[in-house]
Amino acid sequence: MTFERKFVVGLEDIASISLECTSCHRRMTFGPDDRVPVPHNGPCGHEWIPHAVPGAVSVNSMESPLGIFLRVVERIRAISATNPYGVRILLEYPDPS
């Protein structure tokens, strides 16, 4: 018999968002409602976000925020699969137990 555990969380459950440099592994952590500028370089100077990212998402002002969110998540996952970003995006949630 196989057991599988899954945790289902909502956006309201996000405790913090961390950006971890793939070079030095130091993190920048902020709250989900904080409006902070995303740096283009990590603490060690390693480039996090290339200036030209293929397949960047353009935002249509008539599109719903949910539609934009879903497209952005899809694009970040696709771009991260080829690893041009020098940063890992980590979402932190409270321990469910």
Image (cartoon, rainbow, N blue to C red):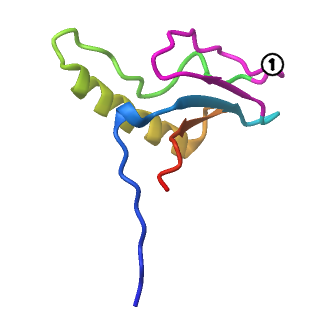
- Image side of residue 10 versus residue 60, left or right: right
Horizontal side, residue 68 vs residue 77: left or right:
left
Q: Mark 1 = which residue?
A: 45
Q: Point out residue 65 in the picture as x, y percentages from the top left corner.
A: 25, 20
Question: Residue at horizontal 61%, vertical 21%?
Answer: 50
Q: Amino acid at mark 1?
A: Gly
Using the rendered view, name the quadrant where residue 17 is placed.
top right
* Above-or-below relation of 58 to 10: above
**Relative to residue 72, is residue 35 depicted above or below?**
above
State the image coordinates of residue 62 (x, y, percent, origin top left): 15, 11
Question: Main SS of the magenta segment?
Answer: loop
| Residue 20 drawn above or below residue 58 | below
Q: Residue 7 in magenta?
A: no
Classify residue 92 by image quadrant.
Answer: top right
Horizontal and vertical percent for residue 19? 63, 29
38 vs 8, nearest the viewer: 8
* Residue 44 in magenta stretch: yes
Q: Is residue 54 left or right of residue 84?
A: left
Specify the farthest residue to the left. Answer: 62
Note whether residue 86 is visible: no
- Is residue 97 found left or right of 21 in the rendered image? left
Report the quarter where the N terminus lies.
bottom left
Q: Secondary structure at mark 1?
A: loop
The part of the image, by quadrant, that contains residue 45 is: top right
- The residue most toward the front is 97
Q: Residue at x 34, y 39 (%)?
A: 10
Q: Which residues are magenta?
A: 26-46
Is 92 in front, or is 50?
92
Q: Say if 63 sits above or below 10 in the image.
A: above
| Mark 1 surroundings within 10 Å by alpha-carbon count, few (fewer than 14), some (14 through 19), many (20 or more) | few
